[in-house]
Image (cartoon, coloured by chain):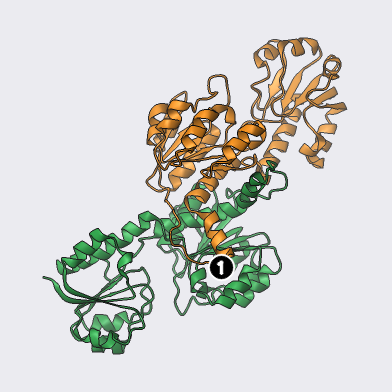
Chain colours: A green, B orange
Amino acid sequence: MKFNKALLIGINETQLGMPYWQRINGLIKNKVFLPKDSPKISENLKTTDCLLVGFGIALTKEDIDIAQNLKYIGVLATAYGKIDTNYAKKKGITICNLPGYSTESVAEFVLAVVLEQIRGLEEGKRRVRAGDVSEAGILTLEIKNKIFGVIGLGSIGSRVAEIALGFGADVRYWSRNKKKKEEKKGIKYESLDSLVLKADILSINLAQTPETEKVMDKKRFLALKKGSVVVNTAPMELVDFDALAKRLAKKDITFIFDHSDEMKKEDLQRLSKFENCVIYPPMAYITPEAAINRQEMFTSNLENFLKGKSTNAV
Amino acid sequence: MKFNKALLIGINETQLGMPYWQRINGLIKNKVFLPKDSPKISENLKTTDCLLVGFGIALTKEDIDIAQNLKYIGVLATAYGKIDTNYAKKKGITICNLPGYSTESVAEFVLAVVLEQIRGLEEGKRRVRAGDVSEAGILTLEIKNKIFGVIGLGSIGSRVAEIALGFGADVRYWSRNKKKKEEKKGIKYESLDSLVLKADILSINLAQTPETEKVMDKKRFLALKKGSVVVNTAPMELVDFDALAKRLAKKDITFIFDHSDEMKKEDLQRLSKFENCVIYPPMAYITPEAAINRQEMFTSNLENFLKGKSTNAV
């Protein structure tokens, strides 16, 4: 079996390598690429049986009603929050995503940016380049025996917690549900308010949902321990910017994040002014290992659906 | 019991905090501080019963013969290679050092500088500061599943290996003696030449001895895998500079080190010219946690000797 007509929204050809496109082309008779705001989406939805969408693409009930021939939605991302999956499933459509393809990439990035910060690496490199080989006054800290908090113990949060355990940290977590399996490894549950208060290092690894938006609010930013280092590799929608800016102005915490590309320019400029706010491009998920996982899962999800044994259906 | 006269060579008062000096002053009637090249060392050695020395201080047979009242040598460092300990012990002198005070500090630093390098953190920060939030083209790598080699499986090397295991690396080691206990954790033995050839990431954690000098020689630098990242937190005497410079010129490996303060200026300038040579001040061991360990062990070694139950005697 093959698909007749794949509609690709918000995906461009450079996002997958040639070997993957070759495999996909063997499963599909025709392909139509459209940007996410294209006025041609509706008319193409009518005739497509295979819809492939990039990160953050919305699909409403109305869209799904239009797509009368649709059998399969393939998401080239982990998140699919803007797709009305319940309605699609009712209509007999299979939706497959890419869970966990970047788990390792993001988890290692969290440790990387924490260590870069708490070991003063930028200052160290700068000094030697300026001809100064003195270590005097560089402020540092060890992870061992520190309270390492993880907010959200999904696949990425769990992996961050495991690696932090390897460093000998006192790892605590908050998650919507208690995780007995993780607790057996020595990761202790805390209420969110208690975790924010106690953590020396805090990693935010929640998915963005209506419930998690601005979960880092004024009260929680004010409660953060003096000297603590907070890393957010999740979307910045989890953060109240006013509250963050207010706490950064006290110069007694460090906030690190990488979803800088999804922010309003004025918000980014405002946070950039704080020396204790360390900002990266969205690079937590970009390892070549994650890129291979992403392409392989996306392609094999398609193949497996056509073989009648779907993988990663949501 | 108290010491009559402590001679302190190559130690200055700022190296220990007030609470530690107060404890030490309670154990000693008089203190004489001398720099390591002082011409007054000999005459003071004659009368001292307690010799306290800083990092890298030499004590020969002749020195020990002069020090006829000497009972105790306290070393404010882990290394004591320049002290003729065998001769001193024959004379009934107890020598105590500070084993492992900086183990955690150095081991975490190794992971910090590796991750900083393989996640392109400097470039990421630079871009955002320049107003560019694109991650395109930043080269990265994961530690998981990579061959992580450790040369020298003493206390620091073992801890580096353990943390790397937590990242899911394939950890291999070479050490003078096979370490069965470490192997049970999943750390595999390799010959040194094989380890150099296979490692994606390589951490050098050998003590400096006549046998280990220039252990990283021409053959081994040429054998390093393309793209590998080598970290040396041990003294640079382990490295043949000509061989290192030759391999760096090929631009296909990265070499990271922190003992930049102990090098000749011309050697440092030569290595600084390579973009793929990342140089830090001697900051692997400088965490406040390590500083407390160092002062506490040094002081309690003295106290315990006087109580007749020496700790950390070599």
The residue wearing badge 1 is: B131
Circle 1: is it few (<14), some (14-19), or many (20+) Cα within 10 Å?
few
Quadrant for the C terminus of chain A in the image: bottom left
Q: Is residue B212 above or below residue B110?
A: above
Q: Nearer the viewer, residue B109 or B292?
A: B109
**Percent x, y of residue B247:** 46, 35
Q: Residue at x 80, y 11 (%)?
A: B66
Please tell me in which quadrant of the rendered image residue A225 appears: bottom right
B262, B171: nearer the viewer: B262
In this rendering, the answer to whether A82 lies above or below B147 is below
Relative depth, front residue between A97 and B239: B239
The extreme right residue here reads B30
Residue B152 horizontal/vertical position (percent): 50, 30
Amino acid type assigned to the residue bearing label 1 in the image:
Gly
Q: Residue at x 22, y 79 (%)?
A: A93
Relative side of A171 to A76, left or right: right
Counting from the top left corner in percent of width and height, residue B257 is at 57, 38
In the figure, is residue A13 to the left or right of A228?
left
Q: Element type at marker 1? A: loop
The part of the image, by quadrant, that contains residue A53 is bottom left
Image height check: is A228 above or below B76? Answer: below
Q: Chain of mark 1?
A: B
